Amino acid sequence: MSLNVVLLPGDGIGPEVTEAAVKVLEAACAAEGIALHTESHDFGGIAIDRHGDPLPAGTLDACLSADAIFLGAVGGPKWDMTPIRPEQGLLRIRKELNVFANLRPLKLLDCLAEMSPLKSDRVRGTDILIVRELTGGLYFGDREEGLERATDSLVYTDAEVERVTRIAFEAAKGRSGRLTSVDKANVLASSRLWRSTVNRIAKDYPEVAVDHVLVDAMAMHLIQRPSRFDVVVTENLFGDILSDEASVIAGSIGLLGSASLGEGTRGLYEPIHGSAPDIAGKGKANPIGAIMSMAMLLRFSAGAPDAADRIEAAAEAVIRDHVRTSDLGGTSSTQQVADAVVEKLMAA
């Protein structure tokens, strides 16, 4: 089989972690007999500088023709106050690709329990998959700008909630059979629609146990007892906040990848960290999140779950061997970690 991947290295540490992750993807594809083709395109702040648009037409066309898209990172202080911002490109590409479900797995390795800012006895055994709705809610509602009055509209339809909920139910069915839906149904009409839709879909999945948690309580529970949760599904804004909160449990935000999926097999894959301009170009960026995103790319867009499993196992082995970047207390560079993952992968 062949695999056409568009690379959007982006800004800050994006190009570095992209280069590292591509090394691992190339090795995995070669071992699997997958004919890999990659091409890079401008996206985010660098695209604003070069083209006046964070998502130029040529970049979008390439993404729409690809089997999968990998994004390094976008944004930085340079563009924080500019009329056109890199994040606008991110919202647009999600909409254009119609990827409506963002999957963020968080699995704490025992060897990193002491790296978590929480007590190790609280975080051991944490293995959560957060499924975040990606194309609705406040980020995409009508808005009114103003210095004295401003509004943002939070709108969801039953169909939007159903499609992301079904992805979460399917994931829960393949894991431990537990699904937590997070909303604010005691206050928001949109959350009451969310909850009623989840309850309706739950009837199609009798093997999955469902509970509902208010978002403010969920923020507390993630700190108090994260290992209680398995699959968590929630709307766009809540998912954005909760998944970033949960990311620190693992010991470093640089460890975690994500997949944004729609109806077909094409997906958008990216590490959840930002562009970290303070360490850009210094070889300090942790590439594991990018590498884990490439594993998800192989699983969901290439239909190669065995290759994905091998990448994840190799990355975990490297961490256990203490080949780590400085965010995990190590001294290895971005590329040294990637080379170590490739070595483990080829030896497996």
Image (spheres, rainbow, N blue to C red):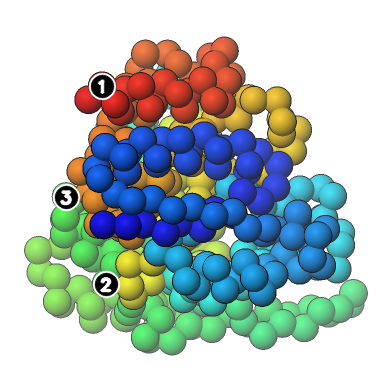
| Residue bearing mark 3 | 176
Q: What amino acid is found at the position of numbered circle 3 in the picture?
A: Ser
Asked whether residue 180 is in view, the answer is no
75 and 56: which is toward the camera: 56
Of the numbered discs 3 and 2, the one sitting upstream in the chain is: 2
- Between marks 3 and 2, how big is the CA–CA gap? 16 Å
Of the numbered discs 2 and 1, the one sitting upstream in the chain is: 2
| Residue drawn 22% across the image and 48% down it | 305
232 and 62: which is toward the camera: 62
Q: What amino acid is found at the position of numbered circle 2 in the picture?
A: Arg
Q: Nearer the viewer, mark 2 or mark 1?
A: 1
The quarter in which the C terminus is drawn is top left
Instruction: Give the crowd class for mark 3: few <14, some 14-19, many >=20 residues within 10 Å.
Output: some
Callout 3 secondary element? loop
Return the x and y of residue 42 as percentages of the image width and height: 68, 58
| Residue drawn 44% across the image and 53% down it | 37
| Residue bearing mark 1 | 347
Using the rendered view, name the quadrant where residue 209 is placed.
Answer: bottom left
**Looking at the image, residue 314 lies above or below residue 160:** above
Q: Nearer the viewer, mark 1 or mark 3?
A: 1
Q: What amino acid is found at the position of numbered circle 1 in the picture?
A: Ala
Of the numbered discs 1 and 3, the one sitting upstream in the chain is: 3
**Looking at the image, residue 243 lies above or below residue 315:** below
| Residue bearing mark 2 | 166
